[in-house]
Image (spheres, grey):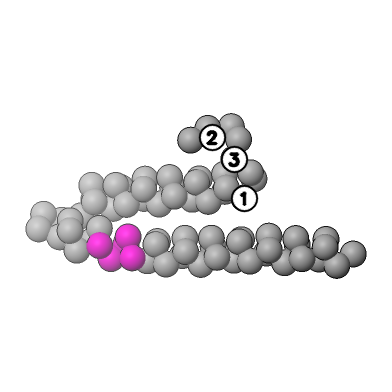
Amino acid sequence: MDLEKLTAEERLIAEQAVLNFRSLNKACDNAKDGTVLAVAERLALIQGRKLIQQTLQTSLELQARAIEKKVK
C-alpha cells in the first residue's frame, strides 16, 4: 500500500488504527500480571467499535457528498 496515495479520509482512519494499536500496547504493558488478555480484549472491542463507527460515518458522508454533486 502506498501511504502517499491515501485520501485525507483514509489517512485519518489509518492514523486512528495506529493510535489504537499504541494505546492497546500501553494498556497491556500497564496491566497486572494475569490480566493482560482480558485488558487487551476489552480495549480492542471498545476501540474497534469506535473505529467501525468512525469509518462508517466517514464513508456515508463521502457517499452523501458524491450524491449531492450528481444532483447539482
Q: Residue at x 53, y 60 (%)?
A: 55
Q: Residue furthest left?
A: 34
Amino acid carrying label 2: it is Leu
Q: Which residue is mark 3?
A: 6
Rendered image: mark on residue 65: none
Amino acid carrying label 1: it is Glu
Residue 47 at x, y = what percent? 40, 61
Name the one closer to the observer, 59 or 26. Answer: 59
Q: Are marks 3 and 2 in contact (CB under 8 Å)?
A: yes
Name the one closer to the observer, 19 or 60. Answer: 60
Q: Residue furthest front?
A: 70
Q: Which residue is mark 2?
A: 3
Q: Which residue is mark 1?
A: 9
Provide the secondary structure element on which disc 1 rests. helix
Q: Main secondary structure of the magenta part?
A: helix
Q: CA distance from mark 1 to mark 2?
A: 12 Å
| Image height of 45 relative to 3, above or below | below
Q: What is the magenta range?
A: 41-45
Left or right position of 10 against 46 = right
Q: Residue furthest right?
A: 72
